[in-house]
Image (cartoon, coloured by chain):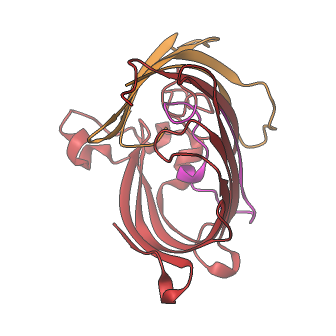
Amino acid sequence: MKGVAFFDYGKGFDDGESLSLNLRPATGFELRWISPFGPLRLAYGFNLHPRTGERPGQFEFSVGTLF
Amino acid sequence: MTFREPYLFDEAVSGQVDLFARETFFVSYFEERIGGDIVLGKWFSEYLSGSVSLLRERLTISNDLASKLFLGGGGTTNVPVSDLPPLIQQQIGTTTTDAIILAIARDTRDLYLDPSNGARYGFTLEFAGGPLGGTNDFYKATGDSVWYFPVVWDTVFSPRARLGVAHAYESGSRLPVGDRFFVGGIQTVRGFTFGRAGPTASDFSPLGGASSSSSISTISSPLRPTSR
């Protein structure tokens, strides 16, 4: 079992929009366990600049995919 | 389903055949892909490897969620085509992709599952359509680099940077929505649901970007001492 702290910064750009470093920031923590069923991840991330209609945070999990 | 032969024709060349059928749901629409690929891979040195893949697939974009086994039973009703985002309206129906994919990677990580040292640099170029046939004509380039630095007490600092660009090069052709870049979610930018750190429709269905850029930085540490 591992504890993880993260800072993520990224964005998908629409057609005609140029790539820039004006990205969407998020930070949070995660638990990782290499289980008999494959790598298991539980993450909670805080959207640092939520826009209208966006939640301030998001809980996610994944099973079987690598980090 | 994957068949892999690590030493094809007694050479240091691996051969792999994949057959797949998958469905991806994007809130108000879904995509189905059925196809296969042939992958030839080669190690050029201890760390450097490359591969060439030939891909052929049939893609269906549909709003007919009610006919789906898991969603239809839950009272899901179809969003009328006229209410779908314009990008999806244009893509409703079935298309085919014939593509060649070139990939190269340099991998010096100490472990595959849980690395604590080393780095992996990967670059992938996909070219679809044109002389290869198929109805989708696009190219797609992606770069992905991840580094692992041991700090103290089994703690590892790992920054990762990814960049992707895709473009339909024929006028009137298209970049299938599932080949766009979905940024947001546990595999890209945590704190967002899938695809929502990129273009979305008014109902928040993710539409995917034509390009993407992301960096994630991670510090991981064992929660109990590892037995030695």
**Closest to the observer, B76 or B199:** B199
Position of residue A17 in the picture relative to residue A3 (left or right): right
Residue at position x 68%, y 67% from top? B45
> Does any portion of residue B14 appear in the rendered image?
yes
Q: Is residue B178 magenta?
A: yes
Residue at position x 69%, y 81% from top? B131
Q: Position of residue B214 (x, y in %)?
A: 68, 33
Q: Position of residue B85 (x, y in %)?
A: 55, 39
Query: Which color was chain B given?
Result: red
Q: Does B144 appear above or below B106? A: above
Q: Quadrant of residue B119?
A: top right
**Closest to the observer, B148 or B126:** B148
> Does any portion of residue A13 appear in the rendered image?
no
Position of residue A4 in the picture relative to residue B171 (left or right): left
Q: Position of residue A64 (x, y in %)?
A: 36, 43
**Closest to the observer, B57 or B3:** B3
Q: Quadrant of residue B87?
A: top right
Q: Is residue B160 magenta?
A: yes
Position of residue B75 in the picture relative to residue B215 (left or right): left
Q: Position of residue B139 (x, y in %)?
A: 70, 62
Position of residue B147 in the picture relative to residue B201 (left or right): right
Query: Which color was chain A given?
Result: orange
Range of magenta residues: B159-188
Work out which quarter of the rendered image holds the N terminus of chain B and state it: bottom left
Residue at position x 44%, y 71% from top? B36
Q: Does B14 appear above or below B114? A: below
Number of marks in picture: 0
**Closest to the observer, A44 or B226:** B226
| Furthest residue in direction left, as rendered | B73
Residue at position x 53%, y 35% from top? B206
